[in-house]
Amino acid sequence: MSFLREIEKKWQELWKRDRVFEADPRKQKKFYITIPYPYTSGAMHVGHGRTYTLGDIIARFYRMLGYNVLFPMAAHVSGTPISSISARIARGEEEAIELYKDTVSIYESDEKKVEEIVMGFKEPEQIANYFSDKVKEDLSTLGCSIDWRRFFRTNEPYYNKFVEWQFKKLNAQGFIKKGNYPILYCLRCENAVGEDDIKGGDEIKAGILELQLIKFPYEDAFLVASTLRAETIFGVTNLWINPKDRLVKILIQGEKWVISKQTLTKLRLQGINFEVLEEMDGIQLIGKRVKNPINSKELLVLPASFVDPEFGTGVVYSVPSHAPYDYIALEDIKKKGASEFGISQAELSSIQPISIIATPGYGDHPAIELCKKLQVRDQNDREKLDQATQLLYREEFYEGVLKPNCMEFSGMKVSEAKEKVFEYLKRQGLASTLYEVVALEKPVRCRCGGEVSVAIIPDQWFLDYGNEKWKNLARECLEQMQIYPQEFKKVFMDTIDWLHERPCTRKRGLGTRFPFDRRWLIESLSDSTIYMAFYTIVHLLRKLNISAERLDDAFFDYVFFKQGDPVEVAERLEINVADLKKMAEEFHYWYPLDLRSTGTAHIQNHLTFFIFHHAAIFPKEYWPRAINLNGMMISEGRKMSKSFGNIVPIQKVASQYSVDAYRLYISYAADPITTLDFRIKDLESFVQKVEKFYYLIKNSKPNKFRRKIVIRSFLSKFYRNLRSAFEKMGNYEVRDYVQLVFFNILGDLASLRNKISEEEFDGVVNFISEDWLRFLTPIIPHVCEELWHSLGNNTYISLEKLPKIKENLIDERMEKLDEFLENLQRDLVTVLKLSKLERPKVANIILAAEWKYKFYEAALQQAKGGKINWDGLIQEFGEHAKPLIKKFLESKVEIIIPRKLELKAIREAKILLERKTGIKVKISLEEKSKIPKAREALPLRPCIFIE
RNA sequence: GCGGGGGUACCCAAGCGGUCAAAGGGGCAGGUCUCAGAAACCUGUGGCUUAGUGCCUUCCUGGGUUCGAAUCCCAGCCCCCGCACCA
């Protein structure tokens, strides 16, 4: 454990004690930044930490820029995961209990207490409360500069009232709709299930598939087949039924359907009423004749083992030309014969594939081609058949076109015809819809063990993001926003385009009751769109101890829009008008939101909803101003997951390493927008970096130092680094900021250290320390705070302002000379080595003749004016200047340093050069030198000659 | 499939027409310091060369544009993310 831990703890406590980050309206420019509140069902880990650290860095930077910064945080507890975890614990599921014991152990050392807390989790509210406290702790541990007075949970009454109000606002504009909606549903719990309720839910990826049911007239009924490709109805040659299955004839909406018995459950769940008329074996239907609904062609029902009664209706139609399964099954039966079903071989042979789709790269019967290519044996060769089916489906869907034998659909693209044909049949009463569960592994089971199916939920409520009026508002809002990095603006535009109705209510979980139908809860993303407005008043609600009951629409309308009579509203709330006005003022002070900062993953949902809802509810001047995005994080080279054991809690980082080191690492290891690979080993070495920095400043002394060229060069680079860093932060390019402000300066210091005495060095470090610390405070606030105080300050550096860049110390010539000295030293060493002299005595450094400097200067002057008049220069300087033309061009001269300065630099460095090379250095001028090689000397490239 | 982002030396990662054999960090090797180690500091980290230099081969693969390409264009291969109710 590093001593940094103590420093970090100390300053976190002091910040808290002195309420350093509490922000109230002041006569000062404001900056309002938010990061999405975390879902608090567990401990925060390093992955979360990235977004919060980046946000905090920005908040701190703006604060030090002189803004009044509001950076609030809350806990999101709405939704289903907390309740399903709670249910699992209540049910006594070992896995869940162990997991939560581990998690709670991060914060509690007493085993008994852990046990007690976890048992309390049988109540979902306990989980919400416990972890929202812990998240607060985690964020404080990270050093986040949050105004904690404004903290709230999304299941508390004040917030509920606020969410209700906003839904009423949306409804008033017609942005809320009602309708039916298919969901995954557990037959045993009799409840909707989300991904985390499903056994292995994150691996098997259960979803909902919309199947097309096609009704084939059969006697007085319909044999109802299911498909995903209604357009292939033109190529049907026969129907398939598994002879082993049980089928039923049912009465449904005045029709009779024949389907597999297993279909009944699905129909029931999907809200379809029916009556079973009779039950039969599949075998009874084999050999019967039905009619193709689209062209009344007679079709034979044939047996096939690949048909699964669990999937769809257990009846499928056969399109051997375009469906590999159908082709193979047909081949199988032709080989085997079907006399046992009373079907003659002649009849079987007469069944021939009908080609209906033309696809580039394929012949008339692509299914046959593929089966042959993949060498499919028979209909039980599922792996190959599935592969072929998938491939063909994709190819035909995107590339295929219907052939002339497809009635009015001929010439249509398959992707289009699929829906069109289905709609056509539906209009004739010959098609219907059925939902089916899809997953990589079936059957899909709930954690309770029950089977998961699809149910239709009636009276589901939707937010109508498809509403053009609303979309346009959202577009307009986005238009005036800054997105960092700006490439992502397009992603937002696309998202606004494709977003449509979104179900916004749930039957279970935590959250706010839906105001128009209290049986429903508002879904967890829908309740988190404009809550930034709520932060501006929540602390005042608490302070005034207003009863949540009384928070009616008039209250919110007044606070947010200054609508209505404040006296009346205040009276109803039983508060002073002044207090009510104060709340309104506070909102109007902080809004609009200046920056929302979070991961790119949220663009397609949360962030775009955030835009939609702001655009719908608030007037233009209160629309959000900017969004900053960051990428996701992996750990030790792979996705963070419990099973990989690569999730590192923030508390572990704090207790074993250092949060400043973590902050430095997170902001430096990758550009904010790219995926960051977190490696504990790297973090370890960052701890050392921070420690090194600490000692560097700590050991500095206010020694006087002479303004040598190397020191002036360093100071110039120092302020230039700060200046560039400042510019980088303007676009939230945090990584570049860290590189400039931390690593570059450390590197420059390291090379300076070799050039000057220890006393001088300590003095230089001391000289820059305060300015440096201020620039580093947003990144590593704790260490900076500690060092700031150790330098004798007694304010909080977190509240100090960034220093002015000392422009007068930025001097290009000094940097050039410094570089020159470094080159000189390197060259000297090289030449010495290459000279192969047994016993070198003296290194002559001979500066070029004065006229060469004049020549260079004249040439540069002309170059700046556009063109160099070489002939004129030669005339002026004489023939011996001719070789300099080439040299001048080669060395790309940008600045001329007078010889006097060059000489001064070498004289200053003389002792150092001698020490580094172990040889005596003699400085002379070309004019006075007898050494022939001296003629080669050029400005900033003196001749080196070893004797 | 669609949409977005990528493939850079041992690893991570910058660069996005010349100043690039390619910043920075990590690792590794050598050195200074030390009784020794850790830390710190310095040096090296494609190859061959050289009085401070020059050359060759490199930035997924293959083509192209250009006086000039890691950087631009085309094709291919591969990876990641989103595609909807999950927060």
Image (cartoon, rainbow, N blue to C red):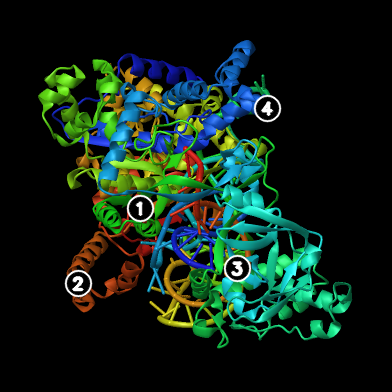
Helix, strand or loop for disc 3? strand
Decide if residue A746 is in sight here.
no
Q: Report crowding for label 2: few under 14, some 14 to 19, many 20 or more residues within 10 A (C-alpha).
A: few
Decide if residue A517 is in sight here.
yes
- Dot 3 or dot 1, earlier in sequence: 3
Alpha carbon of mark 3 to alpha carbon of mark 4: how far?
Answer: 44 Å
Q: Report crowding for label 1: few under 14, some 14 to 19, many 20 or more residues within 10 A (C-alpha).
A: many
Q: Is residue A684 above or below residue A738?
A: above
Q: Which mark is residue A214?
A: 3
Depth check: give the residue in front, A454 or A824. Answer: A454
Q: Quadrant of the N terminus of chain A?
A: top right
Disc 4 designates what residue? A93
- Dot 4 or dot 1, earlier in sequence: 4
- Quick check: marks 4 and 1 in contact, CB under 8 Å? no
Q: Chain of mark 1?
A: A
- Dot 3 or dot 4, earlier in sequence: 4
- Dot 2 or dot 1, earlier in sequence: 1
Q: Chain of mark 3?
A: A
Marks 2 and 4 on same chain: yes
Disc 1 designates what residue? A465
**Amino acid type shown at disc 3:** Ile
Disc 2 designates what residue? A866
Q: Residue furthest bottom?
A: A404
